[in-house]
Amino acid sequence: MKKLIFTTFLCLFITSLGHSQSFKTEEGKATFYSKVPLHSFEGNSENLVGLINLDEKTVDFYIDLETLDTGNGKRDKDMKLTLETKKYPFAEFFGKLVSDFDTESSSIQDVKVKGTFKIHGVEREIEVDGTLQMKDNGLHLTAGWILSLLDYKIEPPQILFIKVDKEQEIKIDALLKPVDG
């Protein structure tokens, strides 16, 4: 009898080791909001790729900057030249969840992540505020922060004598699906 209980316990323990609380997406949405005097515009991509591992509290995302679209071909071309997407094709973030998250709750929970954001070949430590929510079909993430172009050695483009605002608002929204195995 003791052998049966031990074997059952061992099987349950080994099974629990294989159950990771990891979630991934390959189709999250990233949006930036930009301004010039008397005008504002946004750019979007539905190609945000990411992984959140709740056991390790890690957050890892990247986006191919070539997939950003403002709805204006000339502006997109200028933006990609400014970002030097041929040389620096990705924006990347890797960090740690520094606030608690209750996986048993289906409520929207405020979270904070600290980590390294890299764009245009420059890495900087940042803090990002966002929300996480457990759903039946995965983990829903929203987050946002202000990115200063100058911090990443990106010269704000200008139209005639009017420069694009050096600060860009960044927002992400993604439903991450559980990772099997």
Image: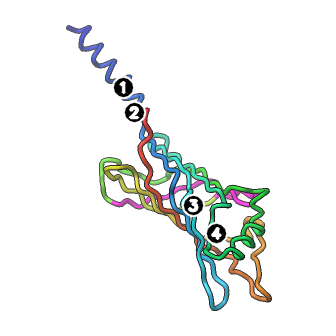
- Taking the magenta stretch, the answer to whether it contains residue 114 is yes
Q: Which residue is mark 4?
A: 147
Residue 52 location, x and y as percent?
49, 47
Main secondary structure found in the magenta portion: strand
Image coordinates for residue 122, horizontal then vertical, percent: 74, 58
Mark 2 sits on what residue?
A: 19
Q: Which residue is mark 3?
A: 127
Residue contact at pointers 4 and 1, CB within 8 angstroms: no
**Circle 4 or circle 3, nearest the eye:** 4
Q: Which numbered circle lies on residue 15?
A: 1
Q: Tell me if 145 is positioned left or right of 152 in this view.
A: left
Q: CA distance from mark 2 to mark 4?
A: 36 Å
Whole-angstrom CA distance, mark 4 to mark 1, is 43 Å
Confirm whether the magenta stretch covers residue 141: no
- Element type where label 1 sits in the image: helix
Q: Which residues are magenta?
A: 108-125
